Amino acid sequence: MSLPGILDRSLTDLSRALERREVSSEEVTLASLSRIEATDGRLHAFLRVAPERAVADARAADARRARGEARSRLDGIPIALKDIFLTRGLETTCGSRILEGFVPPFDATVVERLAAAGAVVLGKLNMDEFAMGSSNENSAFGPCRNPWDLERTPGGSSGGSAAAVAARQVFGALGTDTGGSIRQPASLCGVVGVKPTYGRVSRYGVVAFASSLDQVGPIARTVPDAATLLGAVAGHDPRDQTSSTLPVPDYLEGLEGGARGLRIGVPREWFQGGSEAGVERRVREALAAYEAMGATLVDVELPHAKYGVAAYYLVAPAEASSNLARYDGVRFGLRAPARTLGEMYGETRDRGFGAEPKRRIMLGTYALSAGYYDAYYLRAQKVRTLVRRDFDRAFERCDLVAGPVSPTVAFRLGEKVADPLQMYLADVFTISCNLAALPGLSVPAGLHPESGLPIGLQLVGRPFDEATMLRAARALEREMGPAPAPGAIG
């Protein structure tokens, strides 16, 4: 098996090749590192690479396989992590200058679980600062680019994760999704991205943005790959008090069950304008494909979805205002020189935070301040309850809700930077899923008829029913095929 060719294989195929000893983990890891070296100067998906550590882990995986002691399907497979996960001994910045130089003394739970599965971590991936953004342009270390078109965004905030997977630098990655930050970049880069139910995956050791919305999930090239990664990191963690104790099913079991008999809800509010014509066309074609496969399309209503963006941009900044208060120069990362403690706080936060975190901290602090809490934050929480009830009613009539992930294909770098509202509206279809704490995913649904850029279909499931969501996504993937490899970086 040629090593250049194996980088185009799925994680699932590579796992079988490793099991049959057709290739070694060390060989594949070196091939991935070579691919990163050859392409990342243009892509900038990685913030840091750990080659020595990765090769050592790959050799250990090969030794285990030689003894017949492979730990899991992930044993020896090269992956990478969004730079939001604490990783012992490896700088973790969350895309921010304020954490530059911070090296965690322990691993996040998901990092521990990947290590227990034998996965080989190649490094840390670019992201919007503190996961605040939809284009990866808010990274303090420069934007990541879309491997389909280097002048366009990969989406955000997990832009580096989606770009690295699409560009064949790694076989899978972890990201986080607070308002669409896994699904939107997966859609714009033509890969699969899964946001599990809130509480399905531990947040322990994940740098917090909005604690009631953040969730960890996989980005991969195919649905079985994403299911494998999700199965490795999901499950209860006593160190995370929001972690669910519900058992985790084998997501690969029943994955090939097809779409026949499924009832798929189509919210009219997601098809009332606002999307590019080419995006809506491909999404409707994907829905028609489900009908042809034996699924039933059901009209449903999400009447409060139109308030989702407004509610989200009160709840999320309010929680960010609290979570980011700890970055003041005392314990973590940057400390600006100053004459007094008060000056040190102010200078450190002014130098360390970029424009978007500052904007959201101020929004959130204002929404929580005396005299405004009831008018803004409390009212937003009430809207959040109404959004969840809309989904509850929809799921009385259907098994899944389907629609667009993003109203557009990948937009050009710089196109929306000066207009925060337009940037926020990039998440108009994804935010409701987070407000309602539901599982959602993006699966490739073809290429735009004019630009040739990838488009994703969003599926939203019932709480903790990731299995049905993955089964439906796999049925569409078999019918349409995964997106081809992007050609912009060769």
Image: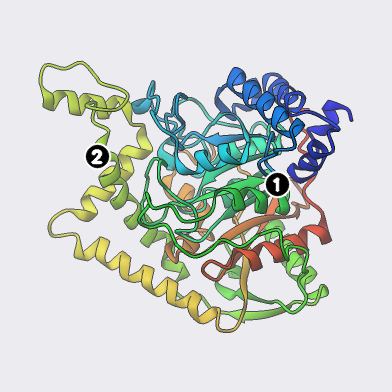
Quarter location, residue 73:
top right
Residue 332 vs residue 342: left or right? right
Residue under the point 61% across and 19% down: 51
Could you say where residue 141 lies in the image, as x and y percent from the top left? Answer: 47, 25
Q: What type is the residue that disc 2 sits on?
A: Ala
Q: What type is the residue that disc 1 sits on?
A: Gly
Residue 388 vs residue 39: left or right? left
Which residue is outermost to the left?
A: 340
Residue 46 vs residue 336: left or right? right
Q: Nearer the viewer, residue 434 or 375?
A: 434
Could you say where residue 283 lies in the image, as x and y percent from the top left? Answer: 70, 63
User: What residue is shown with label 1?
Assistant: 190
Residue under the point 57% across and 40% down: 116
Residue under the point 47% across and 24% down: 90
Label annotation for residue 294: none
Question: Does residue 285 appear in this view?
Answer: yes
Q: Is residue 240 above or below residue 123?
A: below
Q: Quadrant of the N terminus?
A: top right
Could you say where residue 237 lies in the image, as x and y percent from the top left? Answer: 43, 52
Q: Quadrant of the C terminus?
A: top right
Quarter location, residue 8:
top right
Question: Does residue 413 appear in this view?
Answer: no
At label 2, counting other C-alpha atoms closer than 10 Å, the crowd grade (few under 14, some 14-19, many 20 or more) is few
Q: Earlier in the sequence, mark 2 or mark 1?
A: 1
> How are the residues colored?
rainbow
Q: Secondary structure at mark 2?
A: helix
User: What residue is shown with label 2?
Assistant: 325
Q: Secondary structure at mark 1?
A: loop
Residue 363 vs residue 175: left or right? left
